[in-house]
Structures are given as structure tokens and as C-alpha cells.
Amino acid sequence: MSKRSLERVQDAVHGLMKFHGPETAVIRLLETREIQRLRRIKQLGLASLVYPGAEHSRHAHSLGAAYLAIRFGHQLQEAAAEFLPPLLQPGPVEIRDLAIAALCHDLGHGPFSHTWEDQCIGKKDFDDKRNAWAKAFDLDLEDCKDLKWHELVGQGLLHWPDGELHKRLEEHDKSMPGRIQALLRGVYHVPYLPRLLSSDIDIDRGDFLLRDAIQCGVSYGRYDLEWLLSCVTLGYYNDSVVMGFDLQKSRRVIEEFVLAHRAHYETVYYHHTVKSAELMLGLFFKRLKKLATEDRAKFKSFRKRYGSIIKVAAGEVIGPEEVLDLDDALLWSFLCDVAKDKSDPDDILCDLAWRLSQRDLFKAVELPRAESSLPLPISEYLIKQGVDLVKLRSGKSISREDFKEYYLCHFNQDRDILSTKEHDCGFFIDTTRPDRPAIMIQRDREFRALRTMSISTSRIYVPREVRDKAQEILSSRRTAE
């Protein structure tokens, strides 16, 4: 696929990344529109509003993941050669396929990634329209039934016969696009390789934990990559070969990896100001969807430039060409234009857009640990105070219902760090035994306590002008108790 036998890329995380022979296919694929689009989507969405260095893209992360796929693939190649037949050993072709799959694993993400998918696409709306999305990308619905929106879109871009990525893959091997799609869905002729792409300890997390720590300037989210690489091996679970890590040698680095993952959620991904910006963008999408569904004529002046955003907000399905237009720059430009638009498509939408564009973010107020939301009487009183204190940018007052719907958010932090699903779990491999048994990491006595990340903090988010009153209300309640 590439005319050169060696390609080099200098990276902030992995240093000088070298791609040899068939692996250089990764570098040529970088030229395609589908991969180039990832330059315009930030890995951490709105986190740069808090961590100024968090400007890195999904393009950089995907290339780093592809490089790690090659390094882990070579380690598994050595491990497999010790006891597996040739058909189950990864060779240069399999390692190349794994690297390309890693490069493409984030292909379908929309602007601001998870907030877009959760709030503008919406899980329920996507489930209702899954068939239509599959049809728009000419995919078999059976292959898409368990996929998230960004995974389906990624599959569609790989399958798209007019796409540069599909054509570039077919130049080398007509069956390659389908093979990469299957690998990303967890199906491959070397059956243990897909777990490297998606599991508790995988190359996706392996890259972004280090990359996010470096770009954000934090030190507590790192782990020993070189030792982890040296511990990857193969064993047996329910008579099947699985990828895992040497039980005797890897315990401390796996613990370090899991704790690094947890640390990122506690301090970066769930940082109270980062979460405020994400929640506000979610509220913006919520209002946009309501308005676009009820009367798309409101956005007539925006349709030419931002048609793809308006269509998705209105519940329509779009195809590959329009998906390629969706990126952070387009959405941010839309948000800024809504904020200053003289035609005022909607007072609340304009106000939320203005607050986001000017970084006038909602403020967090900590709730008592035992409470996941405000008690009803206090919530009602706070809504009354908010209606009195909040003035929209247009100068108009806000109604009680709209304040409750768009200016008062609850957020409770809870996340499983180790997967509860068997097909995503990581394994320890006991290499001291000839049968090389695999043990789920989460079932290991030492790691059970790490399975669930339980952060006791519960918060509400309110506009800056309401924060002092909210704290006063909660303080009065604590004093009364």
C-alpha cells in the first residue's frame, strides 16, 4: 500500500514512532478525508476550557493507538510462537490490520464526541432510527444492532464505496475494508486480537491515558507502558485463546493502569468545570432539538452553512458526505452565530450559546453526600429564586418551567472502571502452568475493590448569578438539621 519500507512520525507521547513494511499502510491512510476529519475533533471536547493544553485531536490519539497496536501485536506474535499453531499466530498482515483498525476506531465520532452523541443524537432516538442510519450508510442492520452511533458511522465510512478511505484500502486488498469492519466489531480470523481494541486494558486506553495526562499537564494519570508491553501474553479461557497479562509480573502495572484511568475521571473528565461546559452544551442541544423538531423555519438563515447540524437536531438521518462536514469547528461556529444572531431564533438558545461562547459557565454547588438530587421543597424554592435572578441576554425574564428545564442540572458521578461484560473484560494469565489459565482481572480478590469507581460527590449546576443563593439555601438546611 505504501511505496516506502519505513515511515517515521515524531509524537509527543511515544517519541519517534516507526512503521515498517506493511505497517506503513497506516501513514498513507492519513491522507484520506475520513482520517483528516479527526484533526478537527478534539480528543477531550470542552476540557480545554479548563486545561489549556488539552487541544489534542482524535487524529493524534488514533495514530498513537495504531502505533501501540503494532507494538502489542509484535509482543503477541512472540508469545503465540511458543505454543500456538501457525494459523493462530499473528503475522505481518494481521498486525497491519490491527493497526489500521486502531487508526479507524474513532472514525465516526461527531463534534465534541460524547456530548454530541448523548444529547444531539440521543440514545433513544438513535435506537428508534437505527435501521434508517444503517440504510443511509448501506450497512446490514444485523451487523449494527449492538453498535453505538459513532461505531455505526465508523463502520459506514469504512464501507462507503465512494469514500477515499475505502478506495485506499481496496487498492491493496479488495477484502480489506470488510476485514477492518469485522475486526472493529470483534470478529477476526485470529480471534484474540479484537480484545486489544476493546477491553479493560486495551490500546485505546493505553494511548489516551498517557496522551491526556501529558496534554493536560497532570502527573497522576500515567502508567509504565514499557512494563505493560513486556507482560502481554496469551492463555486459555473456556477452551478459547485469549489475550491477557502475565499474572506474576503484571499485577502492579495493571493496578497502576486501572488507577490511572480512575484518576483521569476524577480529575479531568469529571472536573466540575469541564462537566459544567458539557452539561451546558447538552442543554443547548436539548433546546435546539425541541425547536428544530417543532419549526425548522426558525433556522432558515442557518440552513445553508449548518444544514447537517439542523437536520440531525430535527431527527433526520444524514449520509457519509454530510457526516464528513461535522466537526468541532462547524459546531463551535454555529454556536457563536446563534449567540449573536440578530434574528433571535430563540431567547433561551441564544442565551445558552452566549454563555458557552463567553465561558460564562454554570457553577457547581456540592450536595450532601447522601443525596443524589435536591429535596423537592428546596428544589422548588431554588427554582423560584432562579426565576427572579436570571435574565436572558435578550433582557427578558425566564419562566419557571424553562429555568427548571435548562438552567438547573443535577450530576452524580458513578462509573465502572472494570467492565461488567465478559467480552470486554481483561485477563491475567498464569504462565507458570502448562495449561496457561486465564483469570478475569475483576474477579481477582485484589482488584474487586477497584471494579467500581464510586465518587461520593453529587452536584447541582446553576447559573453564576444563582450560585450564592443556592449555597445559602443548602447551608441554611444543614444548619437546621
Image: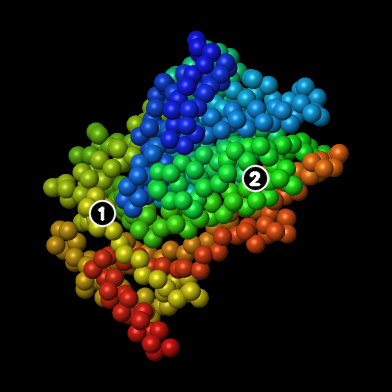
Task: State the residue at coordinates (52%, 47%).
Answer: 222
Q: Position of residue 310 (x, y in %)?
A: 31, 41
Residue 261 is left or right of residue 328, and the answer is right
Residue 125 appears in the picture as rendered: no
Residue 438 is left or right of residue 306, and the answer is right
Task: State the residue at coordinates (29%, 37%).
Answer: 330
Q: Position of residue 340 (x, y in %)?
A: 16, 48
State how many labels appear. 2
Residue 292 is left or right of residue 163, and the answer is left
Residue 328 appears in the picture as rendered: yes
**Farthest residue toward the bottom?**
480
Identify the image quadrant of the C terminus. bottom left
Q: Position of residue 65 (x, y in %)?
A: 52, 34
Residue identified by numbered label 1: 359
Which mark is drawn over residue 338?
A: none
Residue identified by numbered label 2: 424
Sequence-earlier tag: 1 or 2: 1
Task: State the residue at coordinates (60%, 60%).
Answer: 452
Mark 2 burial class by Cα count in 10 Å: few <14, some 14-19, many 20+: some
Amino acid at pointer 2: Asp
Is label 2 in a helix, a strand or a loop?
helix
- 337 is higher (above) or lower (below) than 272: above
- 153 is higher (above) or lower (below) than 428: above
Task: State the residue at coordinates (35%, 50%).
Answer: 51
